[in-house]
Amino acid sequence: MSGAGTVVNNDFSSSTLPSYMTLQGTANIASGQLNITANSTGQSGSVLVQNTTGLANNDFQIDFDFITQGPAGTSFAPFTAADGLSYSYGDDVVAGTYQNVANAATNIGYPSNSPIGNTAEGGSGTKLKISFDAFSNGVGTQVGNNGGTNYAGVYFMYNCTDFFNATRDPNGVTPADIARGVLAFSPSTAWRATAAQPATPVNTTHVTINMAGAEPGFPNGSTTLTLTGTTGLAQGYVFGPVKVALPQDI
């Protein structure tokens, strides 16, 4: 994370994290990597990075790599492993998981039969959330109140509190989706592992998120997302840059 100089820079070569970083659930550090979940069922983990420097919320950049590894999703073949991952930014983000979490609507990852809260791939809090959703859960009462369908893909959300991020359009968003806080959606999934993929090479995708202030056409600022695949099935994959206007209360 960088804004006025580098605020956070961690290659996870040490298992000791600074005080402003918190691991939760199955997340752990091993072999120079932050492992959010293992390739197994019932996994949920997260890392919370607190903004202790007063970094402006409309002028910073975040860069990180994430890895998805096959063989994945054997119980859902030929689909990929459930369920995905997310990035959240806001003053009500928590380092939660679906395991042993208090019943608060901003926590990450409620059990799939819970009537409130968010799934882990749907992010935490009520502000900016970017979801990399690897598995289509379809239509049903678990999707939430927005009347849409949970498709696999990439979601931009702000002020979205639906249990499952969902849209009414499999290739984008409608005005009704935007009104519920799903600002943009793409069915792009080249970043995910598949059941047919060997264990190596892993899929590595580089993520760049830019937060910018007001400018012509974006009176409340914007978020820009770029994905670049570097290894495995993701190699050569490019997504974006996609620039999304933020609402007034960022």
Image (cartoon, rainbow, N blue to C red):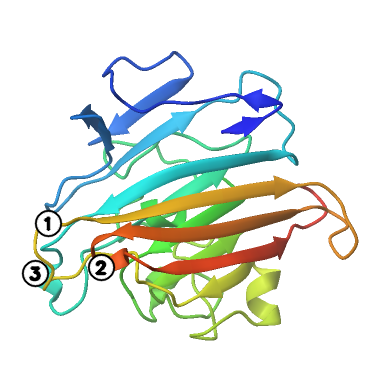
Amino acid at dot 2: Leu
Which tag, 3 or 1, sits closer to the chain's start? 3
Q: What secondary structure is marked by label 1? A: loop
Q: Is residue 245 above or below residue 220?
A: below
Can I make out residue 108 in this image?
A: no
Amino acid at dot 1: Thr
Indicate the position of residue 172 as horizontal and vertical percent values: 57, 81
Pair 3/1: label in front: 1
> Which residue is at a point 54% across and 84% down the rendered structure image?
168
Q: Is residue 53 above or below residue 213?
A: above
Q: Residue 200: which disc?
A: 1
Q: Residue 233: which disc?
A: 2
Label 1 environment density (alpha carbons within 10 Å; few <14, some 14–19, many ≥20): few
Q: What secondary structure is marked by label 2? A: helix
Label 2 environment density (alpha carbons within 10 Å; few <14, some 14–19, many ≥20): many
Label 3 environment density (alpha carbons within 10 Å; few <14, some 14–19, many ≥20): some
**Frontmost residue, 38 versus 196:** 196
> Which residue is at a point 37% across and 51% down the rendered structure image?
120
Q: CA distance from mark 3 to mark 1?
A: 16 Å
Q: Which residue is mark 3?
A: 74
Q: What secondary structure is marked by label 3? A: helix
Give left or right: position of 137 versus 79.
right
Q: Contact (CB < 8 A) between labels 1 and 2?
A: no
Q: CA distance from mark 2 to mark 3?
A: 17 Å
Q: Residue 5: which disc?
A: none
> Which residue is at a point 16% across and 57% down the rendered structure image?
201
**Frontmost residue, 228 versus 41:** 228
> Which residue is at a point 22% across and 36% down the rendered structure image?
26
Indicate the position of residue 215 as horizontal and vertical percent values: 88, 55
**Frontmost residue, 168 versus 69:** 69
